[in-house]
Image (cartoon, grey):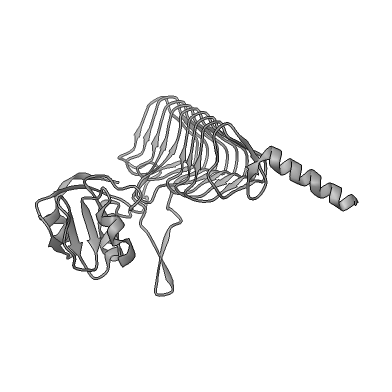
Amino acid sequence: MNFDATYTAGEIADWIDAECIGPDSLPLSGLNEIHKVRPGDIMFVDVEKYFKKALNSAATGIILNQRIEAPEGKVLFLVDNPFHAYETLARRFRTFEAQKSTIHPTARIHPSVTLEPGVVIGRNVTIGERSVIQANSFIGNETQIGSEVWIQPNCTIGSEAFYFKKQNAEYKMWTSVGRVLIRDQVSIGANCTIDKGVSGDTVIGKGTKLDNQVHLGHGVVLGENCLLAAQVGIGGKTVVGDRVVMYGQVGIINSLLIEDDVVILAQSGVTKNLKAKTTYFGTPAAPSRDRLRELAALRKLGKG
């Protein structure tokens, strides 16, 4: 997530009641998780075994709970509870605001857009020309929708990420500060649910088509001209290449890479990265020729 402006480390420290270790004049411009940080970003870490990874990351600001020396070019924020401090920043820039009107006054909607009855449009949403949003769909805060996008009835776009931190046997929900970005000429079937990213963006590439009841978890990135049949579910942060086809009820776990031109046959369960230009089948998914040979061998065993 990018802040609305650049702030100094000293200003950030005041907001989260932290002690600065390092130059308090360093400029900071965003908030992110460790696997997505960029120069200028702030992240948090509260487990010592991950300190080294955090200190060697691209992050400029690191919130932690142990006094250590700040590497050159970085500033550390010393607090008792790093997760709480991170959440304080997240809520500052993504304050919850109950929707008081059907279309938020900050939404930017092209005059050629069609909105059917019951559509709700959140804060800072943008919708490009000739797009259609059908009845009873919800478009959450900060969502960006391109041109000639078709969203069928009862979709939820930009819901909170299903992402929790376990603290003292309880699960604390992270505040989602990411967005959903839908590129041009995307089609989204009825009753689809698309979560916004925790700190980055959930992205649907140009020309991609989703059937009914597809779910995309937080931070999923779909490439261009993909086809996803009904009831496909993709776990958070998985990246899918271009021209990928997924048949009905495919399930994909989080944080995988599905390369270009992959085909995944119906009801397959994907637990590992998939190589380009290959057809996969089964659970766990494997190249379909291998799986079909295994099934043929099992049938022969049964007849023996």
**Relative to 150, does residue 136 appear above or below in the rendering?**
below
**Relative to 113, does residue 213 appear above or below in the rendering?**
below
Residue drawn at (21%, 50%) of the image: 60
Q: Between residue 95 and residue 198, name the one nearer to us.
A: 198
Q: Percent x, y for residue 124?
A: 32, 40
Q: Percent x, y for residue 185?
A: 48, 27
Q: Between residue 204 and residue 263, name the one nearer to us.
A: 263
Q: Between residue 240 and residue 90, name the one nearer to us.
A: 240
| Image quadrant where residue 39 sits | top left
* Residue 7 can be seen in this image: yes
Residue drawn at (40%, 48%) of the image: 197
* Residue 248 can be seen in this image: no
Residue positioned most to the right: 304
Q: Is residue 185 left or right of residue 27?
A: right
Q: Percent x, y for residue 263?
A: 61, 35
Q: How many dots with numbers?
A: 0
Q: Percent x, y for residue 71?
A: 17, 55
Residue drawn at (54%, 43%) of the image: 192
| Image quadrant where residue 154 sits | top right
